[in-house]
């Protein structure tokens, strides 16, 4: 599995898990960093407040707030494309993302 897929899966699971937590405190309980890019490859924990927004809105809001951590400069909506969305066996929404550069998919 390539690095972007792992990042996408980890980020998606963390985001969706955190959206169900009715708390206002934010703390990543588990973060694995990619040693080559110095960006998170997996993040889990309480990442966002409980929200009435859609999972897609929560995902892009989180990414836009964490631009410097993930090292992209344009908006998350311009930097990532949702490749697939599915519900896992626990009912969480899992996103698979493709990173884009000026609209062109990046391949690793």
Image: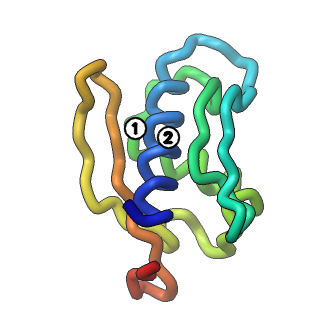
Q: Of helix, strand and loop, which one carries label 1?
A: helix
Place of residue 20 in the rendered image (x, y in percent of width and height, measured from the top left): 48, 18
| In the image: residue 88, left or right of residue 46 | left
Name the residue located 39 percent from the left edge and 68 percent from the top edge: 98
Q: Which mark is residue 55?
A: 1
On screen, residue 71 above or below 41: below
- Classify 10 Å Cα crowding around label 2: few (below 14), some (14-19), many (20 and above): many
Question: How far from the left and from the top, in percent, is residue 46?
Answer: 64, 24
Report the residue marked by disc 2: 58
Give the side of residue 38 with respect to residue 56, left or right.
Answer: right
Front position in the image: 40 or 68: 40
Residue 1 sits in quarter: bottom left
- Contact flag, marks 1 and 2 (Cβ < 8 Å): yes
**Mark on residue 45?**
none
> Which residue is rendered at x = 66% and y = 71% of the image?
72
At 51% across and 72% down in the image, what residue appears? Answer: 79
Q: Position of residue 9 (x, y in %)?
A: 42, 47
Residue 19, horizontal then vertical, whole percent: 50, 26
Placement of 51 over or under 101, stated as above or below: above
The colour style of the image is rainbow
Of residues 27 and 9, the one drawn nearer to the viewer in this rendering:
9
| CA neighbours of label 1 inside 10 A, class few (<14), some (14 to 19), many (20+) | some
Q: Is residue 85 left or right of residue 81?
A: left
Q: CA distance from mark 1 to mark 2?
A: 5 Å
| Left or right position of 33 against 22 | right
Tell me the element at label 2: helix
- Residue at position x 30%, y 19% in the image: 90
């Amino acid at each position: 599995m390539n690095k972007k897929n792992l990042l996408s899966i980890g980020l998606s699971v963390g985001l969706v898990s955190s959206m169900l937590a009715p708390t206002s405190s934010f703390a990543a309980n588990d973060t694995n960093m990619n040693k080559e890019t110095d960006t998170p490859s997996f993040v889990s924990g309480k990442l966002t407040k409980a929200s009435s927004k859609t999972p897609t809105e929560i995902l892009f809001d989180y990414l836009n707030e964490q631009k410097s951590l993930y090292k992209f400069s344009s908006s998350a909506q311009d930097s990532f494309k949702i490749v697939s969305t599915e519900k896992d066996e626990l009912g969480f929404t899992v996103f698979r993302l493709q990173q884009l550069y000026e609209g062109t998919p990046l391949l690793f």
